[in-house]
Image (cartoon, grey):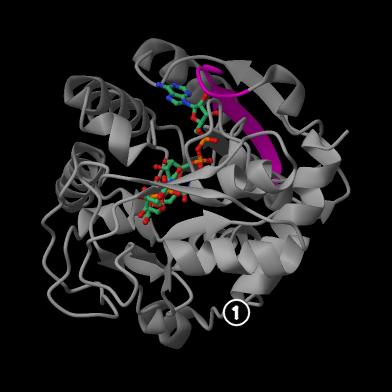
Amino acid sequence: MRVLVTGGAGYIGGTVANALLDDGHEVVIYDNLCHARRDLIPARAEFVEGDLADRSKLEGLFRARSFDGVMHFAALIEAGESMKHPEVYFRNNTASTLSLLEAMIATKVERLVFSSTAAVYGEPESTPIREDAKLQPTNTYGESKLLVEHMLRWIHQIHGLRYASLRYFNVAGAVVNADGARGEAHEPESHLIPLVLDVALGLRKNIKIFGQDYPTPDGTCIRDYIHVSDLAKAHLLALKTLATRERLIYNLGNGRGFTVREVIDSARRVTGRPIEVEELPRRPGDPAVLVASSEKITSELGWSPDYRDLDEIIASAWAWHQLRFGS
Ligand SMILES: NC(=O)c1ccc[n+]([C@@H]2O[C@H](COP(=O)([O-])OP(=O)(O)OC[C@H]3O[C@@H](n4cnc5c(N)ncnc54)[C@H](O)[C@@H]3O)[C@@H](O)[C@H]2O)c1
Ligand SMILES: O=c1ccn([C@@H]2O[C@H](COP(=O)(O)OP(=O)(O)O[C@H]3O[C@H](CO)[C@@H](O)[C@H](O)[C@H]3O)[C@@H](O)[C@H]2O)c(=O)[nH]1
């Protein structure tokens, strides 16, 4: 298949682009590089620099090349930042995605795999979270993605777009393949695991823990960490399944939650280094607990994660982190 990968210069999009290439597909990456580095674009893919909002550029690309599908990763991704600048998130993640969808409708590109998020659920009523749980985001990042899910439902119904909405929980870890190694590095970094590993490497003094008074065993937030290679596997499965099924909505997580302090302890075990912490107030918009039930994708598509152990996920991230940032 020929697949357009929006946001393919980023952490997850780049990893999935490599997995598509390994599986024999042709990949064109479309990214405006607002949060990525040119030298990290997967070397075997074709690259087009452009913004999601540029409908005519996307339409031109679709007409010129006849794509079988789109994997749509391009977005701003920080829940904390989204609570300071909601309008930026609605513009970039929601309105600009509409330009992509308009271009797909106009040129009859039929399949879309969309990066949704656990943040669409907000504070869940029960855990683990199933796909039929209430959708009530507690941050505007989650809302910006939920609005896209609503648009997709209508565009599917009216224009027949086939789509998969994959609601990822917290993605982590690194992958080694023909292109070398690729791991988690956001520009700028705001995610827990890479920041903790920076402290282990001596690049930061300490890790700030946002909130100690959540209703969890140690007072810090609980998240479900999934390895990026397991996520990539699910994307390829979803894209293929859209040949026979029209609309897929799946959670992607490991089914086990870890507090922020447990993640830091795991990093101490894996790296063998001391990791100093500093306790700060809550970060606005953070739900206390997000843990996935991924039973639906397991029973319907046969997906299951290869990485189930947090220490293993962090060890994979650490191996790459030392290569990339160690001296
Ligand atoms: N990292 C996670 O834990 C996580 C969890 C759930 C969902 N997601 C979703 O997965 C996707 C990828 O996340 P990531 O961690 O790889 O982030 P990332 O920041 O590494 O990648 C996002 C990419 O999108 C590009 N981009 C952003 N806005 C654009 C625009 N308007 N036009 C063109 N390109 C644009 C950026 O330059 C970047 O390369 C996002 O949609 C995110 O919401 C991530
Ligand atoms: O320096 C830090 C960074 C994070 N945290 C906490 O660690 C947890 C994880 O935070 P982070 O790594 O920033 O990820 P999330 O905010 O949980 O969001 C990620 O996971 C979501 C799915 O659960 C995705 O939708 C988002 O795109 C992705 O950024 C949260 O409780 C944060 O408050 C800290 O205490 N200190």
Q: Amino acid at mark 1?
A: Arg
Relative image position of residue 215 (x, y in whole percent): 20, 71
Residue at image location 15% in from the left, 48% down from the top: 150
User: Which one is in front, 312 or 218?
Assistant: 218
User: Which one is in front, 54 or 170?
Assistant: 170
The C terminus, quarter of image: top right
Q: Is residue 189 left or right of residue 161?
A: right
Is residue 112 in view? no
Q: How many marks?
A: 1
User: Which one is in front, 33 or 226?
Assistant: 226
Above or below, 132 against 261 in this view is: below
| 305 is within the stretch colored magenta | no
Q: Is residue 84 left or right of residue 318?
A: left
Q: Is residue 242 left or right of residue 321?
A: left
Relative image position of residue 100 (x, y in whole percent): 35, 28
User: Which one is in front, 115 or 245?
Assistant: 115
Residue 59 quadrant:
top left
Q: Residue furthest bottom?
A: 299
State which region is magenta: 25-36
Relative image position of residue 133 (x, y in whole percent): 16, 72
| 33 is within the stretch colored magenta | yes
Relative image position of residue 16 (x, y in whole percent): 63, 49
Is residue 63 in view? yes
Q: Residues within 10 Å of mark 1 (few under 14, many from 20)?
A: some
Residue 294 quadrant:
bottom left
Residue at image location 45% in from the left, 12% down from the top: 57
Element assignment for label 1: loop
Q: Is mark 1 within 8 Å of ligand 1?
A: no
Q: Which residue is mark 1?
A: 308
Residue at image location 22% in from the left, 22% down from the top: 85
